[in-house]
Image (cartoon, helix red, strand yellow):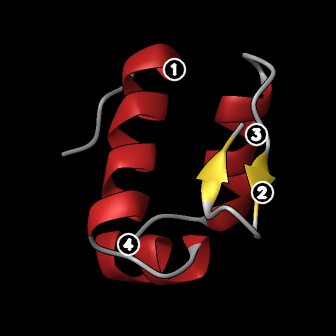
Amino acid sequence: MIPKDPVMLLSYVNTQLRDHYGSLNELCEDLGLQVTELQEKLKAINYEYDRESNQFR
């Protein structure tokens, strides 16, 4: 289960991207998440996915 708190979610997602996944799409597919929903949650705390660095910044 992924964290509901946006700041904890950010930390969790960036760690997963760094350690286990080559892209946001891979992470979402594997964890059964909607890409746009995840992006919206993190955009609410001013973070957007950067494909080049494969992390939310």
First in sequence, mark 4 or 1: give its number: 1
Q: From the viewer's perspective, is 55 left or right of 28?
A: right
Q: From the viewer's perspective, is 42 left or right of 7?
A: right
What residue is shown with label 2?
A: 50
Q: Are marks 1 and 3 in contact (CB under 8 Å)?
A: no
First in sequence, mark 2 or 1: give its number: 1
Check disc 4: other Cα within 10 Å, few if <14, some if 14-19, many if 20+. few
Could you tell me residue 8's position as x and y percent? 37, 21
Residue 37 makes an appearance in the image: yes
Check disc 2: other Cα within 10 Å, few if <14, some if 14-19, many if 20+. few
What residue is shown with label 1?
A: 6
Q: Secondary structure at mark 2?
A: strand
Q: Are marks 4 and 3 in contact (CB under 8 Å)?
A: no
Q: Residue at x 56, y 78 (%)?
A: 23
Could you tell me residue 16's position as x and y percent? 32, 57
Report, in whole angstroms, how far the alpha carbon at label 1 lies from the one at label 3.
Answer: 10 Å
